[in-house]
Image (spheres, grey):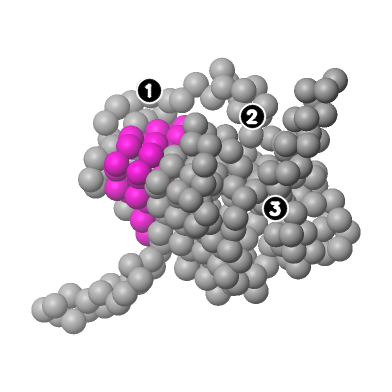
């Protein structure tokens, strides 16, 4: 009994209540905001909250956590930041680790599927369109960037290259640490991406249940998947907040 009470007090103290209340009541209609579907933990900078947030799923308190501890790292550097000028959509529970940088620019669209996850120190820069499928997890220190940020041209023909392109990750994607996912990347369902890889094209023609890896990423192995079914119960326990 005493331990349970102490754990609840510890959990309550870990929540950044000011940022939690500010985000919910600024970004959501009152009837949704009062449920507090978003919880923020630790230090986070709101550089801009001029965009739109939508939750396309049954609302539950603390269903989307920002700054959650679900990895081995127990301390944060305090550099988490949100720049939201476009549209951010959630299809269910979602989870963000410590020190995540999330930027959705004006007219851009970013979507997280059910149990979508960004690990600690992940950077997501959306200027066009980024869709992360159900149960897709992005490992720590990875980055999703759908733009070159600067105009690029062919030095001989002066032809201009597209400055951005959409990113779409399939369901049940397991993205390892330090992976760079760039513009025009599209992955199939049940895809594993090895550490330190660079993805920059459509891989769906390779079929599902594959391992990608390398710079740039290529097919490494077929019939290779994360055993999600054996982990689902544990992931639901550790990542979904129990109130």
Give the residue number, with chain letter if any, for mark 3. 16
Q: In the image shown, does 177 or 231 lie closer to the viewer?
A: 177
In percent of width and height, residue 143 lies at 40, 52
Q: Which residue is mark 1?
A: 223
Q: Is residue 199 left or right of residue 67?
A: left
Observer-nearest residue: 74 or 126?
A: 74
Element type at marker 2? helix
Q: Position of residue 152 (x, y in %)?
A: 25, 74
Residue extending furthest left? 156
Q: Residue furthest bottom?
A: 158
Judged by its main secondary structure, the magenta piece is loop
SS category of the residue bearing label 3 = loop
Left/right placement of residue 73 relative to residue 33 reads left
Q: Residue at x 78, y 37 (%)?
A: 9
Q: Bounds of the magenta span? A: 174-199
Q: Earlier in the sequence, mark 3 or mark 2?
A: 3
Q: Secondary structure at mark 1?
A: loop
Q: CA distance from mark 3 to mark 1?
A: 43 Å
Q: Is residue 137 visible?
A: no
- The answer to whether residue 238 of the structure is visible from this angle is yes
Q: Quadrant of the N terminus?
A: top right
Task: Assign the C terminus to one quadrant of the image.
Answer: top right
Callout 2: few (<14), some (14-19), or many (20+) C-alpha neighbours within 10 Å?
A: few
Examine the image and state in which quarter residue 68 appears: top right
x, y percent for residue 93: 68, 42
Residue holding disc 2? 238
Q: Which mark lies nearer to you, 3 or 1?
A: 3
The residue depicted at 79 percent of the width and 64 percent of the height is 25
């Amino acid at each position: 009994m005493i331990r349970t009470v102490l754990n609840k007090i510890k959990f309550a103290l870990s929540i950044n209540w000011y940022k939690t209340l500010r985000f919910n009541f600024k970004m959501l209609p009152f009837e949704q905001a009062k449920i507090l579907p978003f919880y923020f933990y630790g230090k986070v900078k709101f550089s801009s909250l001029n965009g739109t947030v939508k939750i396309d799923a049954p609302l539950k308190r603390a269903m989307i956590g920002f700054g959650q501890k679900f990895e081995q790292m127990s301390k944060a550097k305090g550099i988490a930041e949100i720049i939201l000028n476009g549209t951010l959509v959630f299809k269910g529970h979602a989870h963000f680790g410590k020190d995540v940088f999330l930027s959705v620019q004006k007219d851009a669209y970013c979507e997280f599927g059910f149990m979508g996850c960004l690990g600690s120190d992940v950077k997501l820069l959306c200027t066009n369109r980024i869709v992360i499928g159900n149960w897709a997890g992005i490992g720590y220190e990875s980055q999703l960037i759908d733009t070159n940020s600067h105009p690029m041209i062919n030095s001989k023909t002066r032809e201009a290259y597209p400055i951005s392109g959409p990113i779409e990750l399939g369901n049940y994607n397991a993205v390892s640490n330090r992976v760079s996912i760039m513009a025009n990347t599209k992955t199939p369902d049940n895809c594993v991406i090895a550490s330190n890889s660079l993805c920059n094209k459509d891989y769906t023609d390779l079929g599902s249940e594959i391992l990608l890896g390398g710079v740039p990423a290529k097919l490494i192995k077929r019939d290779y998947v994360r055993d999600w079914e054996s982990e689902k119960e544990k992931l639901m326990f550790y990542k979904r907040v129990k109130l």
